[in-house]
Amino acid sequence: SATTTAGGFSDHVSFAILDLRPYQDRYLAAATDTSRNIILDQATGQILRNLYGHANDGFSQPKLCWSANGQYVLGNTQDEAVICVWDIASQQIVQRLDGHASPPRDL
C-alpha cells in the first residue's frame, strides 16, 4: 500500500516487468517499462539494486542477460543501437557495446 509523503505525493511507483532473468537460483534481473532494471533477491523478493541510464517504455522490448560470473547485467535500450553493461555492485553503466545497425531486440 502506498503512503503519503511530506509533499502530499504517493510513494507508490507503478511499472510493468517485461523481461525476467534468473541467476543461479539466487537473484532475478527484471527489465521494466520505466527505464529501470531491478535486481531482486529471488528468495525474499527484496530489491537489491536499481539500474538506470537507458531508455525503455511500454512500447519497447527490454531484454536482459547476466554475465557468466554474475558481476554484470547486459540490457538493450529502445532508442540507441547499443547494449548497456551495468556493474551490479556500483549500479553504473560501465560500457556501451555499439556497432549494431538498429536497437537490439533480444540478447
Image: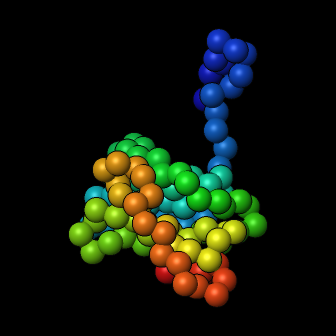
Residue extending farthest to the right is 59
Residue extending farthest to the front is 99
Which colour scheme appears in the figure? rainbow
The residue drawn where x is 42% and y is 52% is 92
Residue extending farthest to the left is 69
The residue drawn where x is 40% and y is 50% is 91
The percent position of residue 107, horizontal first and vertical second, equals: 49, 80
Q: Which quarter shows the N terminus? A: top right
The front one of 19 and 94 is: 94
The front one of 14 and 49 is: 49
Q: Quadrant of residue 94?
A: bottom left
The front one of 7 and 94 is: 94
The percent position of residue 101, horizontal first and vertical second, equals: 64, 87
Residue extending farthest to the top is 6
Report if residue 64 is visible in the image: no
Q: Quadrant of residue 103?
A: bottom right
The percent position of residue 64, horizontal first and vertical second, equals: 48, 70
The vertical placement of 93 against 61, above or below, is above
The residue drawn where x is 66% and y is 61% is 56
Instruction: Determine whether, in the image, residue 72 is placed left or right of residue 95.
Output: left
Q: How many marks?
A: 0
The residue drawn where x is 48% and y is 69% is 96
The percent position of residue 34, horizontal first and vertical second, equals: 65, 52
Report if residue 14 is visible in the image: yes
Instruction: Determine whether, in the image, residue 38 is placed left or right of residue 90.
Output: right
Instruction: Determine whether, in the image, residue 70 is placed left or right of residue 91.
Output: left
The vertical placement of 79 against 15, above or below, is below
